[in-house]
Amino acid sequence: MLRDESACNTYNYGDSVYWDARYINEASAGSFDWYQRYHALRPFVRKYVPTSSRVLMVGCGNAVMSEDMVKDGYESIMNVDISCVAIEMMRRKYENVPQLEYVQMDVRDMGLFLDDSFDSVIDKGTLDALMCGTDAPISASQMLGEVSRILKPGGVYMLITYGDPKARMAHINRPIYNWKIELYIIPRPGFQKPLGSTSSPKSYLSPVPVTENGMLPADYVVEDPDSHFIYICTKMSEKSNLSDSLTVDI
Ligand SMILES: C[S@@+](CC[C@H](N)C(=O)[O-])C[C@H]1O[C@@H](n2cnc3c(N)ncnc32)[C@H](O)[C@@H]1O
């Protein structure tokens, strides 16, 4: 889902009314994690997000990712979503889990949070949802501006998306954010490697080399066409050397 423009046109992923209706319809099903479950993302989360971090999960939906992180030792996760239905359900479900907080909020305006107040922001599918809405580039820029504002210098925005660098770099790699960006590519759950493939699961744990402007090298082969992309965006302090980070002219 959300793989291409036609998926965007079929569903109103950028619209809170769509999400409220969806969470009401699926209430009996319990929870659903888009793209990947925590166990698959754990190597990246543990590498870039210390367990003592103050974490913000943007567009948490009814995913169990935050619960799994708490079971893995994470101490403080603030979860926000535009859907009041999802937030109410999750608040009730986790009322006895003090590490988890749920607040209804539009990620394009997170004025409730102070500047530099989170160590880490995790986004699994939320920028993707905004990219399907009306005025997508404006929504993306509002959201990413807010993420940049609330992240502490040295903090990390982890973006898990179906969007490859051609679709995402122009939005995330802007000098105004001053983010150093690393990229990982992981296959979708259940992907069967083609016969004769020589890659090992371990190779997914190495960052993918990108060109000077953040694109995949021309000869780079993405084994699974439905791969997920993980962008690790580290907020450099103002004094950091910008030449260390990727920059793209947009
Ligand atoms: C593709 S789902 C991902 C849910 C969850 N992160 C997961 O991995 O399963 C996108 C989520 O973003 C939320 N969302 C969409 N637009 C939003 C906005 N402007 N502000 C906050 N949340 C939003 C939706 O309600 C939905 O829960």
Image (spheres, rainbow, N blue to C red):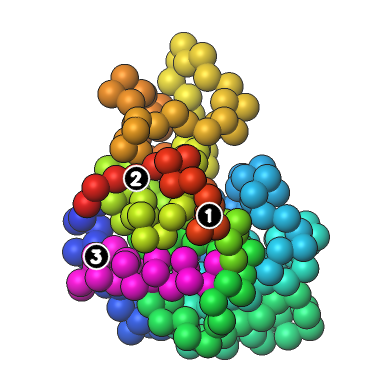
Nearer the N terminus, badge 2 or badge 1?
1
Name the secondary structure under disc 3: helix
Horizontal side of residue 63 vs 145, given as left or right: right
Name the secondary structure under disc 2: loop
The residue wearing badge 2 is: 247
Q: Is residue 3 visible?
A: no
Nearer the N terminus, badge 3 or badge 2?
3
Whether the residues at callouts 1 and 3 have beta carbons within 8 Å, the answer is no
Q: Is residue 205 visible?
A: yes
Q: Which residues are magenta?
A: 129-151
Q: Position of residue 157 (x, y in %)?
A: 52, 58
Residue drawn 47% across the image and 16% down it: 197
The residue wearing badge 3 is: 137
Residue drawn 52% across the image and 33% down it: 207
Name the secondary structure under disc 1: loop
Residue drawn 62% across the image and 27% down it: 202
Q: Is residue 219 magenta?
A: no
**Majority secondary structure of the magenta segment?**
helix
* Quadrant of the drawing holding the N terminus: bottom left
Instruction: State which quadrant residue 141 falls in.
Output: bottom left
Confirm if mark 2 falls within 8 A of ligand 1: no
Q: Amino acid at mark 1?
A: Lys
Q: Amino acid at mark 3?
A: Pro
Q: Is residue 132 magenta?
A: yes
The residue wearing badge 1 is: 239
Q: Label 2 crowding class (10 Å Cα cut-off): few <14, some 14-19, many 20+?
A: many
